[in-house]
Image: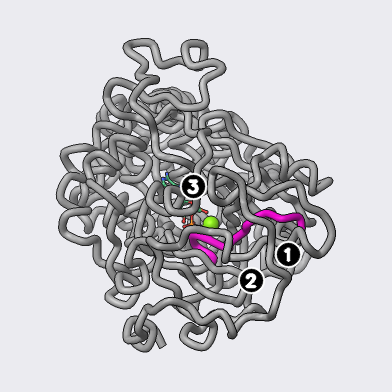
C-alpha cells in the first residue's frame, strides 16, 4: 500500500472529487483565517489555503479510512470546519494509520487560536506555557488540538536568565543557544508543517475530501522507513533538545532507520538535554518506556550515548550484559513491553525500581564491601541513588516512595518467619515486590527458591498456607535483627539478604 502511495503522481487535486461545498468567503489577510461567518456558509474549504508547498494525495490513493479514526477526533474536525476553521488530523494519527498501526492518540492542527477553540468546545482546556495547546477531553480520550505555528523571528533572544520570569508575556522567545522558550506565534499551514519534528510526523489528513497533504516528503520517508528531521538537524535539536529523545523513541517504535544526517549530531548534542527541566525529561522517559518498545529503546539510548545523560548510573552498572543486574533490567523492560501488548498497565514506580536497581546494588556493594545488606543500609543507598537520578529526571514523590517499598520488600520477602510472612502478604505493594523478586531469580540470582515459596503460598488454600507458615516457625525477627552467617559477596551487586 505504501509503495503504491509513493508511486502516485502528486499532481494538483481535482476539485470534482470531494463533496460539493458552498464556496467560502475569501479568507483574511493571513491567507487562511476565516471571516466572521455563520451557518453552512461558514464551513472552511481547502480552497482557502495556499497549498503550493504540498503534495496532495487523493482519497483513493491512500489507505486511511475515516472509520479507523477516533469518532471524537472526527467530530472535532467537523465542528472546527463547520465553524469556518481549517482543521487536520496530524502527527502520529496519520503516520500510524498509514503504517497500518493503531494510533496511540489523535492530534489535530487548526488555524483556530486556543481561545477560539475554547469558545467552540465546552470541554476545552488550554495547557502549556512554552507551547500552548488545547486538550479536549472525551471520557478517557484526550484530543490534542494545536494552532498552526509560525517561524521564529530572531528578535526575542534571551541572554542569560531564561527563567519563566524573564520571558513572561512573550509569545516568541529563544535562548542565545537557539532553544525555543516560547512558541506561541501563529502562522499558516506551510509554516506549521515545517516546524514539526520529523517528515513522517508532518502529514495532514483532511475531512474536506479525505485527502492527505504532504509538505515534507513524509510519505516517501515512511515508505522507505526512514526517520528524517525537517530542516538542519543541529539547529532543530538546539531549538528543542527533546527532539533527540523523540528521534530515539520513534526509531524504536516504528522500526525506522534514523537517516544519516538526522543521526550524525545526536551524540555530540546529547548534552543539550541538560537545559531541559527534569520534570519534562521525566515525562519523556515515561513515553520512552511505555510505548511498547522499551527494550529496543533502551538499547538505542545506550548506542546513542543519550542514555549516559539520562541514566548515567544505570548505564555504568550494566556494561556487562551478562551480569544479573543487566539481565534483570532487560527482563523488566521486556516484561513491560509484553504487559502493554496484552493491554495491561505498567507503573512508573516498577519501571524506575528496575532502572535504578543496578546502581542501587553498586552503591550497596561500595558501602558494605560484601557485608550483609541491612534495611538501614539499603535505605541509605536508595536515598543516594534516587537523589542523583532526580537531578536529571524529576521522579514524583509518590513513585519514589513506591520504588523504595518494592526494594524494601526484596529484603522483607526473604525474612523467614510466620509473623513477617503474614504481614508482608498484606503489604499494598506485595504483588509488585513479588514480581520484582521473580525477575531477579529469572535474571540469574540464586535466592534459594524464595520465589517458588511465595508462588506456592499464593496458590495454596488456607490449609496449605497455614502449613507453610507453621513450617517457618514463630520467629518474629526482621531482617535487621536476624543473625546470619557472613554471606557471600552479592554477585555483581545483585544482592538482597536472601
Ligand atoms: P505518538 O503520539 O504516537 O507518540 P506523535 O507523532 O503523535 O507520536 P505527539 O507527541 O503526540 O507525537 O505530537 C504530535 C505531533 O506534534 C508530532 O507528530 C509532531 O508533528 C509535533 N511535535 C510534537 N513534539 C514536537 C517537538 N518537540 N518538535 C516539533 N514537533 C513536535
Ligand atoms: Mg500523538
Look at the image and give the residue range highlighted in magenta: 83-93
Viewed as shown, does residue 376 lie left or right of 323? Answer: right
Q: What residue is disc 1 on?
A: 78
Helix, strand or loop at mark 1 = helix
Classify mark 3: helix, strand or loop.
helix
In the image, what residue occupies the spot 58% across and 57% down? 107
The answer to whether residue 456 of the structure is visible from this angle is: yes
- Quarter occupied by the N terminus: bottom left
Q: In the structure shown, which secondary structural element does the residue marked by tag 2 occupy?
A: loop
Tell which of 30 and 124 is nearer to you.
30
Q: Which mark is residue 159?
A: none
Report which residue position mark 2 lands on. 207
Residues tagged 1 and 3 counted as in contact (Cβ below 8 A): no
Q: Earlier in the sequence, mark 2 or mark 1?
A: 1
Front in this rendered view, residue 167 or 13: 13
Residue 291 falls inside the magenta stretch = no
Marks 3, 2: nearer the viewer: 2
> What is the distance, in whole Å, between disc 2 and disc 1 at their CAs?
8 Å
Which mark is drawn over residue 286? 3
Coordinates of residue 188 in the picture (x, y in percent): 50, 48
Amino acid at each position: 500500500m505504501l509503495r503504491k502511495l509513493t508511486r502516485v503522481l502528486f499532481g494538483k487535486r481535482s476539485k470534482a472529487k470531494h463533496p460539493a461545498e458552498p464556496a467560502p468567503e475569501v479568507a483574511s489577510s493571513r491567507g487562511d483565517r476565516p471571516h466572521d461567518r455563520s451557518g453552512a456558509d461558514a464551513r472552511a474549504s481547502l480552497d482557502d489555503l495556499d497549498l503550493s508547498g504540498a503534495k496532495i494525495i487523493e482519497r483513493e490513493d491512500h489507505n486511511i479510512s475515516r472509520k479507523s479514526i477516533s469518532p471524537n477526533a472526527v467530530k472535532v474536525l467537523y465542528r472546527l470546519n463547520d465553524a469556518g476553521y481549517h482543521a487536520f488530523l496530524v502527527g502520529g494519527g496519520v503516520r500510524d494509520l498509514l503504517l497500518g498501526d493503531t494510533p496511540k492518540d489523535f492530534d489535530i492542527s487548526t488555524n483556530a487560536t486556543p481561545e477560539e477553540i475554547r469558545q467552540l468546545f465546552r470541554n476545552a482546556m488550554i495547557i502549556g506555557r512554552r507551547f500552548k495547546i488545547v486538550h479536549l477531553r472525551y471520557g478517557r480520550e484526550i484530543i490534542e488540538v494545536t494552532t498552526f505555528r509560525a517561524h521564529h523571528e530572531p528578535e526575542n533572544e534571551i541572554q542569560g536568565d531564561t527563567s519563566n520570569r524573564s520571558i513572561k508575556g512573550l509569545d516568541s522567545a529563544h535562548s542565545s543557544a537557539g532553544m525555543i522558550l516560547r512558541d506561541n506565534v501563529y502562522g499558516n499551514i506551510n509554516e506549521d508543517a515545517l516546524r514539526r519534528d520529523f517528515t513522517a510526523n508532518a502529514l495532514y489528513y483532511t475531512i474536506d475530501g479525505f485527502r492527505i497533504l504532504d509538505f515534507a516528503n513524509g510519505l516517501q520517508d515512511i515508505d522507505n522507513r526512514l526517520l528524517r528531521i525537517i530542516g538542519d538537524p543541529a539547529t532543530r535539536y538546539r531549538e528543542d533538545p527533546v527532539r533527540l529523545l523523540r528521534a530515539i523513541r520513534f526509531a524504536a517504535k516504528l522500526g525506522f532507520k534514523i537517516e544519516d544526517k538526522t543521526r550524525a549530531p545526536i551524540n555530540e548534542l546529547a548534552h543539550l538535554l541538560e537545559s531541559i527541566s527534569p520534570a519534562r525529561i521525566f515525562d519523556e522517559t515515561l513515553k520512552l518506556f511505555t510505548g511498547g518498545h522499551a527494550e529496543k529503546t533502551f538499547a538505542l539510548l545506550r548506542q546513542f550515548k543519550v542514555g549516559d545523560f539520562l541514566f548515567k548510573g544505570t548505564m555504568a552498572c550494566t556494561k556487562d550484559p551478562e551480569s544479573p543486574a543487566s539481565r534483570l533490567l532487560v527482563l523488566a523492560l521486556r516484561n513491560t513491553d509484553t504487559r502493554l501488548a496484552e493491554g495491561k498497565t505498567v507503573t512508573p514506580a516498577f519501571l524506575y525500581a528496575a532502572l535504578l536497581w543496578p546502581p542501587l546494588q553498586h552503591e550497596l556493594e561500595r558501602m558494605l564491601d560484601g557485608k550483609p545488606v541491612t534495611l538501614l543500609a539499603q535505605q541509605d543507598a536508595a536515598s543516594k541513588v534516587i537523589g542523583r537520578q532526580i537531578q536529571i529526571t524529576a521522579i514524583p514523590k509518590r513513585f519514589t516512595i513506591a520504588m523504595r517499598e518494592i526494594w524494601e520488600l526484596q529484603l522483607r520477602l526473604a525474612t523467614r518467619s510466620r509473623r513477617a510472612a503474614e504481614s508482608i502478604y498484606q503489604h499494598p505493594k506485595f504483588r509488585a515486590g513479588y514480581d520484582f523478586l521473580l525477575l531477579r531469580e529469572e535474571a540469574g540470582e540464586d535466592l534459594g527458591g524464595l520465589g517458588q515459596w511465595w508462588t506456592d503460598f499464593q496458590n495454596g488454600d488456607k490449609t496449605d498456607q497455614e502449613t507453610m507458615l507453621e513450617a517457618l516457625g514463630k520467629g518474629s525477627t526482621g531482617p535487621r535483627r536476624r543473625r546470619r552467617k557472613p554471606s557471600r559477596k552479592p554477585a555483581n551487586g545483585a544482592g538482597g539478604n536472601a
